Image (cartoon, rainbow, N blue to C red):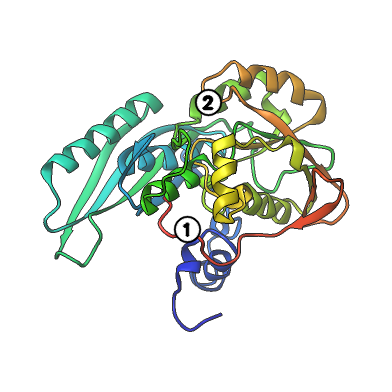
Amino acid sequence: MAEKITLAHGSGGKASHELIEKFFVAGFGSKSLVAMEDSAVLTVGNETIAFSTDSFVVDPIFFPGGDIGSLAIHGTVNDLAMRGAKPLYISVGMIIEEGFAFKDLETIVRSLKDGADKAGVEIVTGDTKVVQSGKADKIFINTSGIGLLDKELDISAQNGRVGDKIILSGTMADHGATILCQREGLQIQGDFKSDSAPLNHMVAAMIKEIGEAIHVLRDPTRGGVGTTLNELAGSSGVGIRIKEAALPVRDDVKGACELLGLDPLYLANEGKLLAFVAPDAAESLLAVMKKIEYGENACIIGEVVAEHRGQVVLDTIIGSARMVDMLHGEPLPRIC
Ligand code: MG
């Protein structure tokens, strides 16, 4: 590992994982950190809760489909929902650069509140710091959240089983492509819009439909579907096989990726989830998801296999097969 932090350490890909393992898991050593889940599951008195935290440094702070405020709520709400928890309470910490306009702060506060209302969570505590002009870029936000968990549920990155069907809740790479086009001022034809959204209501409906037949949930944010599937293959100790022809990508997003030489498998999503579910429950779950907001384009993209454990293999459109590795390097810093 290099002697200093590089942008790749914030990519959510291979370098991030090495950093987390070398410094944070080794340094803090708690059992829930070792599990590398989206949120920690803890016992408090008689209740089981999920607890998660996330920081947002997205650039630009306003983009089609949302802003840093809505993104900060959705990110934490979704990380709680990915353990099957019902998100309840959120904290908001802000680091603001001197000179930041009140008008922009007002917009962001409104987005935080609207996001919280839509997700059904309450913002209950916060913190504000201001740094000198040039010492931060406009505004950074940290959100932490607590959710309540049904003890009977055991949804975890470690629970993927051979035979599970892998469902993706909608199109890939919408957030990553939107931020990229916006930031670089690219004049690419298309209706780019971030998919940033709260997924907790969809998860609740999914649990109601098939309950324990859901083994794994994860939102493929930084690093995209490709990196997330690698994490899940590793955590569950299984192989993953996906079909290129089944991967949902909007035409304009696909076009932008081709133009820029980026693979939509590695671009961030902020309103999508991957679910590993028992094969006999997959079709009924899919039917339910398709009727729910944010799940209209849900589809089965592959399955869990006994071969090539810890690895992801893609069956390409032209009939070959290739390995899908974790994201290397950092093509798009500050995507969320
Ligand atoms: Mg996540």
What amino acid is labelled 1 in the image? Answer: Leu
The secondary structure type at the circle numbered 2 is loop
Q: Residue at x 69, y 54 (%)?
A: 230
Q: How many marks?
A: 2
Q: Which residue is mark 1?
A: 332
Q: Toward the viewer: 218 or 227?
A: 227
Residue 225 at x, y percent in the picture: 62, 47
Residue farthest toward the bottom in the current orientation of the protein = 3
What amino acid is labelled 2 in the image? Answer: Tyr
Badge number at residue 294: 2
Residue 21 at x, y percent in the picture: 57, 68
Q: Residue at x 66, y 19 (%)?
A: 209
Going from the N terminus, do you reach mark 1 or mark 2 first? 2
Residue 66 at x, y percent in the picture: 35, 36
Q: Residue at x 34, y 31 (%)?
A: 115
Against 12, residue 204 (above or below) is: above
Residue 249 at x, y percent in the picture: 62, 37
Asked whether residue 328 appears in the rendered view, the answer is yes
Against 168, residue 229 (above or below) is: below
**Is the residue at mark 1 in contact range of ligand 1, meaning its CB lies under 8 Å from it?**
no
Q: Is residue 122 left or right of residue 204?
A: left
Q: Characterize the local packing of mark 1: few (<14), some (14-19) or many (20 or more) Cα atoms within 10 angstroms.
A: many
Q: Is residue 26 left or right of residue 192?
A: right
